[in-house]
Image (cartoon, grey):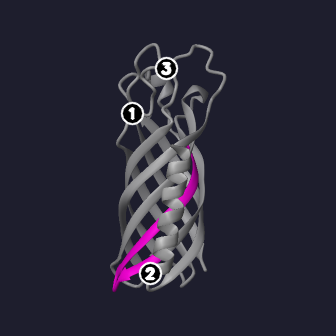
């Protein structure tokens, strides 16, 4: 499955790079304020986690004000409690509409693959699913032609917990506010 996802991402970047009218590439770095929304998590464990997001992007003009921005990023998410921390490699596919030369709005799906979870889960309560799917919406500001900033909100569309690997049958999805800055070549 990991090889299939990698192939799809590489194919998408290649196809868009060949067919796009105007292509730009860049990097993003920022901070996440994330949590897992669940009725099964006790109140003393539901504090949000501050994590980092860093990644690469491609920016393709589709038409006048419409752009497609596929990304590949690392994101530290979950809750503050160590047993509820999880890190992902994610592929957001953001459709951007430039309201003006400075402001844009963004919307798109995001697929994530778990690359790390807290391994010292002594009570065996949490076990995270390998894949996470989310919807993302945001606003962006072009500071200069190369520098930009984004504010995004993502909401999980899938259960982050592995129901088979958890003895208590946890159910929850991710929530994430992300503030980042970036540079496009």
In the depicted structure, whether residue 166 falls above or below residue 71: above
| Along the line of sight, the residue nearer the viewer: 21 or 171 | 21
Instruction: Give the CA separation, mark 2 to mark 3.
Output: 44 Å
Q: Tell me if label 3 and label 1 are in contact, CB under 8 Å.
A: no
Secondary structure under tag 1 reads loop
What label sits on residue 159 in the rendered view?
A: 1
| Image spot of residue 107 (x, y percent) | 35, 62
- The quadrant the C terminus occupies is bottom right
Answer with mark 2 or mark 3, whichever residue precedes in sequence: 2
Residue, x 36% and y 60% (percent of image)? Answer: 108
Callout 2 crowding tier (Cα within 10 Å): few <14, some 14–19, many ≥20: some
Q: Earlier in the sequence, mark 1 or mark 2?
A: 2
Question: Mark 3 Cα within 10 Å, few/some/many (few <14, many 20+)?
Answer: some
- SS at circle 2: loop
Q: Is residue 108 magenta?
A: no
* Residue 75: percent from left, percent from top: 57, 49
Of pointers 3 and 1, the one earlier in the residue sequence? 1
Q: Nearer the viewer, residue 38 or 168?
A: 168
Most extreme residue toward the right is 120
Above or below, 95 relative to 50: below
Instruction: Between label 1 and label 2, give the one nearer the viewer.
Output: 2
Task: Return the residue at label 2.
Answer: 20
**Residue at the spot x=58%, y=26% of the render?**
83
User: x%, y% of residue 103?
Assistant: 39, 77
**Residue at mark 3:** 165
Q: Which residues are magenta?
A: 60-76
Residue sitting at 46 percent across and 74 percent down? 16
């Amino acid at each position: 499955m990991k090889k299939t996802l990698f192939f799809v991402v590489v194919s998408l970047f290649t196809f868009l790079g060949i067919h796009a009218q105007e292509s730009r590439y860049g990097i993003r770095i920022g901070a996440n304020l994330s949590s897992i929304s669940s009725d099964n998590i006790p109140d003393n464990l539901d504090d949000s986690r501050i994590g980092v997001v860093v990644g690469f992007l491609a920016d393709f003009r589709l038409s006048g004000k419409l752009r497609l921005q596929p990304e590949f990023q690392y994101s530290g998410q979950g809750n503050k409690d160590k047993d509820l921390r999880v890190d992902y490699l994610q592929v957001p596919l953001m459709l951007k509409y430039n309201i003006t030369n400075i402001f844009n709005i963004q919307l798109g799906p995001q697929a994530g693959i778990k690359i790390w979870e807290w391994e010292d889960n002594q009570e065996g309560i949490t076990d995270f699913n390998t894949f996470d799917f989310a919807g993302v919406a945001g606003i962006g500001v072009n500071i200069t032609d190369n520098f930009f900033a984004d504010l995004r909100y993502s909401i999980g569309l899938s259960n982050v917990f592995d129901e088979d690997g958890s003895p208590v049958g946890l159910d929850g999805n991710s929530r994430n506010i992300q503030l980042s800055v970036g540079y496009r070549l």
